[in-house]
Amino acid sequence: DIQMTQSPSSLSASVGDRVTITCRASQSISSYLNWYQQKPGKAPKLLIYAASSLQSGVPSRFSGSGSGTDFTLTISSLQPEDFATYYCQQSYSTPPTFGPGTKVDIK
Amino acid sequence: QLQLQESGPGLVKPSETLSLTCTVSGGSISSSSYYWGWIRQPPGKGLEWIGSIYYSGSTYYNPSLKSRVTISVDTSKNQFSLKLSSVTAADTAVYYCARRGPSDAFDIWGQGTMVTVSS
């Protein structure tokens, strides 16, 4: 299985901050990398697919980049509704695997 | 607007079989572009893919669960189902059904259903 890691595991930020979350795969996954946002008690929501493509309806302050083994999710200006846990997931090979998550909370 | 809804018992006894159904509404499960899957999340932990199915019945399972998992589809009811046998407390989790689209991402999720394994 391809192992996914994320850093940091948690971060505290203020509204308006630029936030960057990193995801690393244990082997090259090309651009087969997706990002999800999960709020407490809710299902994950797809934000970014194929490393850098914005899912329909997702605000443009979210962006993704990277290829191979290293990827980033950036929130350009953090909004109150963005406080949540973010997961990366590789779709390069079966089984699809998720990172352990990065919790973004209010400073 | 496509929606997914999980249903099934919230409590299962150890060694028994967990059974859940996902009902798809607002669209057809028989669309050729999509796979339909199950993902679970133990309390306070991360996400684990269980398996996926195509409307034709082709299945893909997580090797770590393969010996205990069966996923099936009923196109006449627009539903797909999960069976997980010989459950233990480690199978206690929120179980989500989700659609995997052409982008290979899980783009639509059900709200999730909590299943507790306890006697």
Image (tube, rainbow, N blue to C red):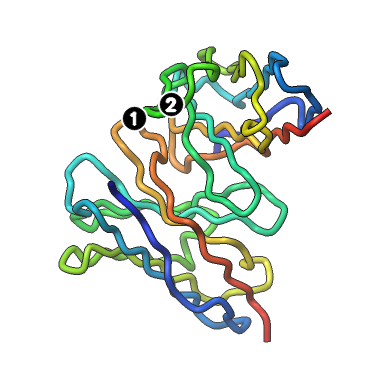
Q: Where's residue B112, x and y in %?
A: 51, 59
Can you say whether B36 is above or below B115 in the image?
Answer: above
Check disc 1 and report the residue beneath it: B103
Q: Is mark 2 on a helix, strand or loop?
A: strand
Residue B67 screen position, x and y as percent: 48, 65
The chain holding disc 1 is B
Question: Which residue is farthest right?
Answer: A107
State the residue in front, B19 or A106: A106
Secondary structure of residue under mark 1: loop
- Which residue is situated farthest in the bottom direction here? B119
Q: Residue A49 carries which label?
A: 2
For the C terminus of chain A, give its image quadrant.
Answer: top right
Are there few (<14), some (14-19), or many (20+) residues within 10 Å of tag 1?
Answer: some
Residue B63 or residue B18, whichever sits in front: B18
Determine the residue positioned at 57% across, 81% down. B12
**The N terminus of chain A appears in which quarter of the rendering?**
top right
Residue ID at (23%, 58%)? B57
The answer to whether residue B55 is above or below residue A70 is below
Q: Position of residue B108 (x, y in %)?
A: 39, 44
Q: Do the residues labelled 1 and 2 touch (CB within 8 Å)?
A: yes
Q: Could you tell me how far apart the alpha carbons at marks 1 and 2 are, in whole angstroms? A: 7 Å
Q: Characterize the local packing of mark 2: few (<14), some (14-19) or many (20 or more) Cα atoms within 10 angstroms.
A: many
Q: What kind of residue is marked 2?
A: Tyr
| Amino acid at pointer 1 | Ser
Chain hosting mark 2: A
At x 69% / y 28%, what residue is drawn? A6
Query: Residue A48: x and y, percent?
Result: 47, 25
